[in-house]
Amino acid sequence: MKGDILMTEQDREVAIRTIKDILHTLHEKRYEDLPSCVDEMEWDDTEVIRECIQGTLDINDFDTFDEYGVPCNFHPRYEYHHEVEFYERSDGFDAEYDLTSGGELVNLRLQLEFLYLKDGVKRIFRTIDPT
């Protein structure tokens, strides 16, 4: 365990890679594959996940979620990787990411937790919540 050590660049890279994997899975609408992107799923009913987030896409006339790094259409203009928010704790950190479709915000936020272990970081899918 790291204890009080702050998040390293390697930890940050693990978080970004995890977010990229999840966004790719969402983009492809392969919701049943979400568990393969992380070590643990707090929200583990992928059928309910599909219904909730696909419903949000449908209600807002969006086709699919964007992959990580897709150019945005909102202002002020910024790159998505700057939108990953990290919250450090002594036992790990949380990462949050606002989902988009067609470069527009869809009012859903991906929430992940990362726990420090002796041999790396445990990646936990917490939820996708309305913003």
Image (spheres, helix red, strand yellow):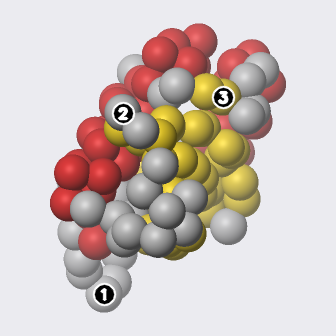
* Residue that numbered label 2 is attached to: 119
Q: CA distance from mark 2 to mark 3?
A: 20 Å
Residue 45, how many percent across, how many down? 77, 20
Local packing at callout 1 (Cα closer than 10 Å; few below 14, some 14-19, many 20+) is few
Which residue sits at x=24%, y=77%?
78
* Contact, mark 1 vs mark 3 (Cβ under 8 Å): no
Q: Residue 41: which disc? A: 3
Q: First in sequence, mark 2 or 3: give its number.
A: 3
- Secondary structure at badge 2 equals loop
- Secondary structure at badge 1 equals loop
The one nearer the camera, 86 or 127, is 86
Q: Nearer the viewer, mark 2 or mark 3?
A: 2
Local packing at callout 2 (Cα closer than 10 Å; few below 14, some 14-19, many 20+) is few
Which residue sits at x=59%, y=12%?
32
Q: Is residue 118 visible in the rendered structure shown here? A: yes
- Secondary structure at badge 3 equals strand
Q: First in sequence, mark 1 or 2: give its number.
A: 1
Q: Residue 14: which disc? A: none
* Contact, mark 2 vs mark 3 (Cβ under 8 Å): no
Q: Nearer the viewer, mark 1 or mark 3?
A: 3
In the picture, measured across the screen, residue 14 lies left or right of residue 122, that is: left
Give residue 53's quadrant in the image: top right
User: What's the amino acid at mark 3?
Assistant: Met
Q: First in sequence, mark 1 or 3: give its number.
A: 3
User: What's the amino acid at mark 1?
Assistant: Pro
In the picture, measured across the screen, residue 89 lies left or right of residue 46, that is: left
Local packing at callout 3 (Cα closer than 10 Å; few below 14, some 14-19, many 20+) is some
* Residue that numbered label 1 is attached to: 76
